[in-house]
Image (cartoon, coloured by chain):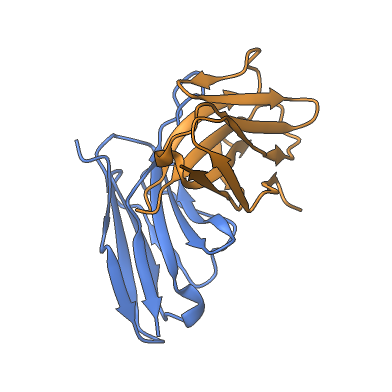
């Protein structure tokens, strides 16, 4: 079963508008972390934002915010005031702790965002 | 401070050949990971290590071996390359200090083509 689901293979947004990228997750671990990464065409993975399962408030980092709805198991990324440089692939990931002090990360299949001028 | 580096950046192999991908990190991180990225599949975990001398299997370990003889290095080996192993390989490292906010830091990737 998919543990991280990103249902939008591709998205378009007009420059300066906001866009929401969807992510749902599945875990029975009470302690987990949720991450978003950006992968531009150059290929590197860039960390954007983190949300812990016990965090009471939604995470924000500049123009990025994470809409965390724990009961619905969703962790959507909101990018405000989109810029042309935001065009990239975006990955949602979950860090689980399977036990014995280990940590594993599971990635979604990604959403390709294109910002239009 | 170079972060996470990967060697080589690009390689072409023939079916049946072997090779080793090297990942090095200078952040004194305990955890290191190898992923492969294929179109439409996201990143899939191959093997990981929680410390020097330890390794564990991830989601897609078949056809790969790893070693972590030094804390800063994590090697990924392909003993007999197959076309299905054509992919982009990413190494990552992390520490898990109290608080849990630590992210993974990724290398630039190695593009491998198996003919």
- The picture's colour for chain A is orange
Q: Quadrant of residue A101?
A: top right
Residue B18 visible in rendering: yes
- The picture's colour for chain B is blue
Q: In what quadrant of the picture does the C terminus of chain B appear?
A: bottom left
Query: Residue at coordinates 55% horizontally, 44% vertically from top-left?
Result: A91
Outermost residue toward the right? A71
Outermost residue toward the left? B1
Q: In what quadrant of the picture does the N terminus of chain B appear?
A: top left
Query: Residue at coordinates 38% horizontally, 53% vertically from top-left?
Result: A43
Outermost residue toward the front? A117
Image location (x, y in percent) of residue A48: 46, 32
Query: Residue at coordinates 59% horizontally, 61% vertically from top-left?
Result: B40
Image location (x, y in percent) of residue A110: 58, 50
Q: Is residue B12 above or below residue B62?
A: below
Q: Does residue A78 appear to the left or right of B95 in the view shown?
A: right
Image location (x, y in percent) of residue B109: 35, 56
Residue A99 visible in rendering: no
Q: Is residue B28 above or below residue B92?
A: above
């Amino acid at each position: 079963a998919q543990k991280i689901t990103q249902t939008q293979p591709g998205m378009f947004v007009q420059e300066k508008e906001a866009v929401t990228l969807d992510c749902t997750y599945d875990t029975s671990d009470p302690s987990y972390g949720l991450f978003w990464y950006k992968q531009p065409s150059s290929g590197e993975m860039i960390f954007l934002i983190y949300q812990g399962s016990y965090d009471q408030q939604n995470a924000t980092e500049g123009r990025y915010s994470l809409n965390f709805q724990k009961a619905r198991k969703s962790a959507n990324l909101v990018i405000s005031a989109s810029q042309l440089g935001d065009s990239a692939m975006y990955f949602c990931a979950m860090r689980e702790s399977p036990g014995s002090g280990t940590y594993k990360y599971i990635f979604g299949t990604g959403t390709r965002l294109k910002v239009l001028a | 401070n170079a972060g996470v580096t990967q060697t080589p950046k690009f390689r072409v192999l023939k079916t049946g050949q072997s090779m080793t991908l090297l990942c090095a990190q200078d952040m004194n991180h305990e955890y290191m990971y190898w992923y492969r990225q294929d179109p439409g599949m996201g990143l899939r975990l191959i093997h990981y290590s929680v410390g020097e001398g330890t390794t564990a299997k991830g989601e897609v370990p078949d056809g790969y071996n790893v070693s972590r003889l030094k804390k800063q290095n994590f090697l990924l080996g392909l003993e007999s390359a197959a076309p299905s192993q054509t992919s982009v390989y990413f190494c990552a490292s992390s520490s898990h200090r109290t608080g849990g906010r630590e992210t993974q830091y990724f290398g630039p990737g190695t593009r491998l083509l198996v003919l």
